[in-house]
Image: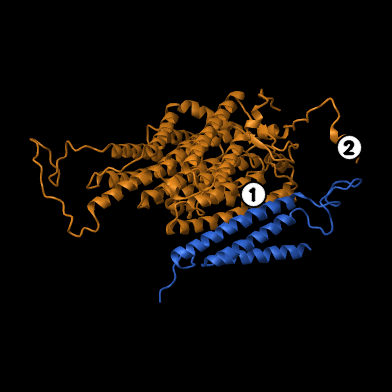
Chain colours: A orange, B blue
Amino acid sequence: MIRLPIDPSLPHLLAAPILLPLATAALMLLIGEQRRRTKAVMNLVSTGFGLLLALGLLVWIDHVDKTAAFGVYLPGNWPVPFGIVLVLDRLSALMLVLTAIVASAVVVYATARWQHGGVYFHVLFQLQLMGLYGAFLTADLFNLFVFFEVLLAASYGLLLHGGGSARVRAGLHYIAINLVASLLLLIGVAAIYAVAGTLNMADIAHKLPLLPESDRGLLYAAATMLAVAFLAKAAAWPLNFWLPPAYAAASAPAAAMFAILTKVGIYAILRLWSLCFPNAPGALPPFGQEVLIWSGLATLGCGAIGMLASQTLGRFAGFSVIASSGTLLAAIGLAQTRLTGGALYYLASSTLAACALYLLVELIDRIREIAAIEEGFDDGGDDLRPFDTPALPEGSNLDDSEQVLTGRPLPAALAFLGLGFGTCALLIAGLPPLSGFVGKFTMLSVLVDGDLRAWALFAMLLISGLLATIGLIRAGMRHFWAGATRSSPRIHLFESLPLAFLLGICVLLTLRAETTLRYTQATARALHSPQLYVEAVLSARPVPPPRSSEPRVDQELPP
Amino acid sequence: MEIVVSMAIGVMGGAGVWLVLRPRTFQVLIGLSLLSYAVNLFIFSVGSLSTGKEPIVKPGLPADLTNYTDPLPQSLVLTAIVIGFATTALFLVVLLALRGLSGGDHVDGREEQP
């Protein structure tokens, strides 16, 4: 049993990431449909406070104990296997911080323009945050389903934000797929309850090795149902055809927020599989790892081919999310401690990069819109441009169409977008020197010592990196080099700040790679010794009621 | 009783899957509803089927499933019904919006032009 030197007020902070967005959303609903500025400020403040909270929890969990640290909170003060439990460990702290970073960037971006696209943007955004934080914190299987539904219901609204035929059509597919996946999740949860008689994840992990042989079949069926539901949400091949059109149709802030939604599926699989089917003596035989590896490899291949084939940047971003999911699934399936550590670092880097890319997609599309307007589609002849040719300065360098090459100013906004796109490309393709490369290299260095499956992942990582590079170079040439007019898009300050923030954090991840990798490796070690988690949760005791010297009033009442 | 309940789950589940795979949106909606009924019935049945038993432990009797019925699946199914109902309503709204925007009720395709 692990005794933590906990400040007595601190355990209550574990519930704060869930309660804060819930309270904010409720307050916003009370304000009504008007007062968008007030709601934007509330959203900004609440999200920023959530980021501070998540960072605080991360720092705390990292400093408590070097081997395994858990914060366990019993919201209803019921004894452990009966009540709902919130558990903070290194993995959930990492996911909380990632969510908070993405959310902060997105909310600032949305205040520039997109918040005007619909009435309930801020409310839905906060509810989505609540679902995400809850899914990462809860240690109860049914509660996980409830938080999944909260975040999905909010994501349906966010996907439709802005309206339009394309969004509604994509939204219909997205809702139908996710409803079916949720029903599968429910079947899995119910069957797990039928087998184990409990819904607490730690208690399930504790009871599974004691199961009689006759119940194993139902357990494996339940685990398969759960896995199919999580894999559909994590966009594993062949359950991922909904993702690129849905994410490409969503408004930029919604799509950027969705970059973390697939990671919830990954998180759930990592959590449940490391708890229930660990590679440890005395545990159940490994189940489903092969399927995870090969479906991960297929997903990675699907993402890589999709990146090469996609014609628009929005679809490219969708396939890059799929490729990142595939890498993570295969790494989880291989279940080696050092590999998982590298994969978690890659998860952080790729989530931030995908979020930044989705924000960039809209800004880059704005260049093309402006160029289209300037070239004039409906040029009826009454608005001809004057033929004047200004006198060229001496010794000018001319390009093919006799235009001056030197001395033409590159608009600042265009330079910023180009720089952002280049950084994003390095991160997504996993090229040196940024964090995408560090994550991939960490995984590759472990995979070298592996068997055939490890080598397959090794090869797929390199090939997908190459295909991503080709796709990104093509997109960059089309958008930044080939344009005949160098028209500068108007970019709001609040649209460039989050982009710089996200890419700056990726640079920080690169500069502080050793610290981050030390953290993710400690996370992986804790994940691969699940008995620590089980002991920490099962040994949590409810807080005894306060003892008062006077007898309680209700005991004096006549029955 | 087990055979009746499992047949009901099976029939509703089968009909639901068939309807979800149909091309028109209203069929998908009904299919999703049927599927969620099947799943709710399934959750209800995992807590051991019995008639005339209360989910209350009586004093003097040992608290096992021969003397009372498990209350947890009932509370789970209640949550699942509420959530399923809300999401189905949302799906209905999107269905109507799509009908208004595209003029057809196809999930993926288009109405054939004569």
**Nearer the observer, A463 or A85:** A85
Label disc, if present, on residue A479 of the rendered structure:
none
Q: Is residue A30 left or right of residue A161?
A: right
Q: Nearer the viewer, mark 2 or mark 1?
A: 2
Please state which amino acid type lies under the numbered disc 1: Ala
Q: Residues within 10 Å of mark 1 (few under 14, many from 20)?
A: many
**Nearer the observer, A15 or A113:** A113
**Nearer the observer, A433 or A288:** A433
Gap between marks 2 and 1 measured at Cα: 51 Å
Discs 2 and 1 carry the same chain letter:
yes
Q: Residues within 10 Å of mark 2 (few under 14, many from 20)?
A: few
The answer to whether one can see residue A367 in this image is yes
Q: Earlier in the sequence, mark 2 or mark 1?
A: 1
Label disc, if present, on residue A557 of the rendered structure:
2
Judging from the image, what secondary structure is the residue with disc 1 in?
A: helix
**Residue A139 picture quarter:** top right
Q: Can you identify the residue that label 1 sits on?
A: A223
Q: Quadrant of the C terminus of chain A?
A: top right
Which x, y percent locates residue A248? 42, 51
For disc 2, the chain is A
For disc 1, the chain is A
Please state which amino acid type lies under the numbered disc 2: Leu
Judging from the image, what secondary structure is the residue with disc 2 in?
A: loop
